Image (cartoon, rainbow, N blue to C red):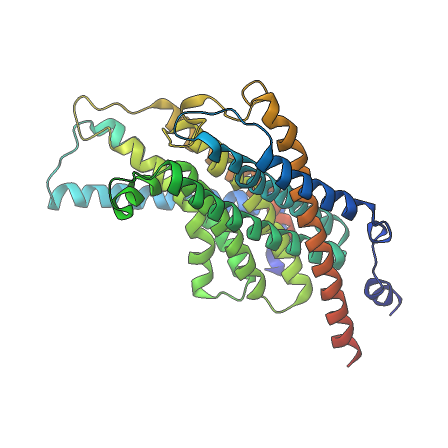
Amino acid sequence: MLYYYTIASPQNFVLAKLLFNSILMLVMSALSMLLFSLFMDYPVKKTGIFVGIVFLGGWSLSLVFTFLAAIAAKAQQNAAIMAILGFPIIIPQLLILMKISSGVFLISGSVPAINISLLLVSDLLVVLLAIILFPFLWKD
Amino acid sequence: MLPIKRLLLYKPQCMKKWWWKIVCILLLVYTITAGLLFNVPRKPIIQESIRNLYFHVCMWFSMMILFTISVVHAVKYLRNNNLRSDILSRHYAVVGIVFGVLGYSTGMIWASFTWADPNSSSFSSFGAIAKDPKLIGAAIALLIYFAYLVLRDSINDLDKRARIGAVYNIFAFAFLFPSIWIIPRLLESLHPGGQGNPALNPQDIDARMRLVFYPAVIGWTLLGVWIVSLKVRLQMLKEKNVLES
């Protein structure tokens, strides 16, 4: 940790972590979507939107849990702490995702744009908070 | 040793003034008597139980104000590294949670008279009530702050605990707004104010109710602040005992 102090600023460090976890999550979401569509029925009627929703959901979850991992890392790495901290914050995102994805399983279903923009705004909020607050977590 | 002594002999400036406690008592007495005696507009179904507005909604407003004060102290801690701000922010969060739980219970009592269908068993109407987005949003807010308390207890070192607690407090406060205010407003809800029109905007609430409502908010908030001040003084005494033994 002391080595990272010398080569990067905390903002760069946390942005790098967020970016890496986002890409990891996108890859894993893509893989799992592929496997699900191979092994099970494919009830999705609008594939493009569904892929977008999967990526958006994966990205939102990975951002929140990256920041929480930064907090939990300082709290003696208790395994349950991440679940306890993360669970209430994840709930509104999951609710919105559920509402959005109910539209892709019917030809006539609609995907309200306001919910998508709400998710994007909350992701932006998490990223901004992580950048502002990480320097305080970082110094030991 | 000198800073610690000053910390232990802490009696904030506001303690030396007692006038706000008298104001608190007077406002609460006014709220309860005027709330129950003054005339209120009779809406369909709600009828007289609209008086619960002075208790239920005030609890949530007080909770928001107390959480705001808590986050202000958290930010102060991060800037000054003064443990006093950390203790204050924790206790404001705890009393905020208590007010939130009270808000939930007053809401439950109110719902049992207005939203529950008296012709079917309470079990069947519970399902419809529990899906209300504002209830879920409020539960999320309380859960986030419970998680804050759990996080604080899981760290042993005092300074680290204060710092990480302050960081999570700011994060939690930022999440209050989407979950309680924004999401319930967008989704259809049993609460007034769903589908985009706010219920508590000044043109909407009746003038007679406004007369009792605004003093009530101030009264309940002052009560919360009074409770916090007592808790903090108790905490300081406990720490003094620990340090001296």
Measured as percent of width and height from the top left, residue A108 is found at 18, 21
In the picture, measured across the screen, residue B77 lies left or right of residue B151, that is right
The image shows residue A103, relative to residue B23, as above or below, that is above
* Front residue (pair B12, B208): B208
* Front residue (pair B193, A101): B193
- Inspect this view and state whether residue A92 appears: no
In the picture, measured across the screen, residue B22 lies left or right of residue B147, that is right
| Residue that sits furthest to the front in the current view | B37
In the picture, measured across the screen, residue A19 lies left or right of residue B211, that is left
| Residue that sits furthest to the bottom in the current view | B245
Residue at 36% in and 36% down = B115
Measured as percent of width and height from the top left, residue A61 is found at 40, 44
Measured as percent of width and height from the top left, residue B25 is found at 72, 46
* Front residue (pair B137, B17): B17
Residue at 53% in and 49% down = B102
The image shows residue B173, relative to residue B151, as above or below, that is above
Residue at 78% in and 72% down = B240
Residue at 25% in and 39% down = B119
